[in-house]
Amino acid sequence: MKTKDKVHVELGDRSYDISIGEKMPIGTTLATERGLKALIISDSNVDPVYGKECESALEASGFITSRAVVPAGEASKDLKTVGLLYEQAIASGLDRSSVIVALGGGVVGDLAGFVAATFLRGVRLIQVPTSLLAMVDSSVGGKTGVNLPQGKNLVGAFYQPVEVVADMNRLGSLPEREYRSGLAEVIKYGVIWDAGLFRALEENVAGLICRDLEFLKAAVARCCEIKAEIVGMDEKES
């Protein structure tokens, strides 16, 4: 597999790039608009580890930052939490030019994405996935949503980010269960879409087990290419 630093998602005037690597800058798409306000939404597991790092990266790109932290887990993906995040966005002085940054796994990506899609009728969104599953699936394609008591993802929107930043360094500290969940999704891409990817995974089991970042970078890039192709053909995956 070829290693790529960027994968393009083609959606006309809503197109964006997925940056894949290590120690990646954040917010480069909007770096010319210095002084923008950015609200980083993360959870109680991710923020203590990566919150300050993300904040520093955004400030280096010229953003004025604030952070909002929700309890980790699916229970935070509800309208009550959305309301609290709206209040945080108002308190942080966000306006229509501002940016919401989703720093975390799938739950945070869905939640922050929905807040970005609906606050002030839509502010820009940057996805910074910290789990393997989020890197290859939920951060790409624009699906956002929250749960109701009657079921999962019953309220949501299709809302594309302006940028996705997948930093391989974050995979080193991922709990084994979460890492294996992401690997299952990577393998699924190989089984359904790309026999070459599946062969590469079979031939590099040791690299997968030891979390070889160079091999994972190539695997993530290939999965993102496939997801970008799917989204480009059918944005709502109907």
Image (cartoon, grey):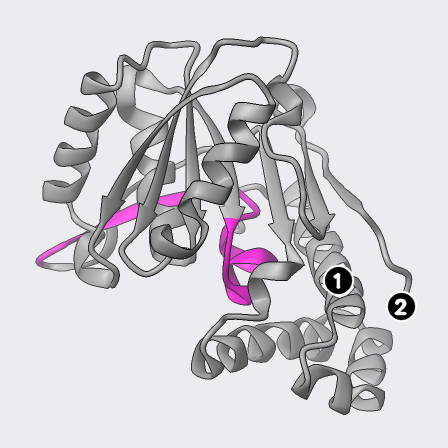
161 in magenta:
no
Q: Residue at coordinates 43% horizontally, 42% vertically from top-left? A: 52
Residue at image position (56%, 34%) is 57
Q: In x, y percent, where is residue 53?
A: 50, 43
Q: Amino acid at mark 2?
A: Met
Decide if residue 9 is in sight here.
yes
Q: How many marks?
A: 2
Q: Which mark is residue 217?
A: 1
Above or below for 113 versus 43: above
Q: Is residue 191 above or below residue 111?
A: below
Identity of the residue furthest to the right in this view = 2
Disc 1 marks a residue whose amino acid type is Lys
Which residue in the structure is indicated by mark 2?
A: 1
Determine the image quadrant of residue 107. bottom left
Viewer can see residue 142: no
Quadrant assignment for the N terminus? bottom right
Residue 8 lies, in percent from the top left, at 75, 39
Nearer to us in this view, 52 or 150: 52
Which residue is rendered at x = 34% and y = 40% of the image? 41
Q: Quadrant of residue 205?
A: bottom right
**Quick one: 173 or 17, which is closer to the camera?**
173
Task: Give the residues in magenta.
Answer: 129-149
Classify residue 22 as left or right of residue 58: right
Q: Secondary structure at mark 2?
A: loop
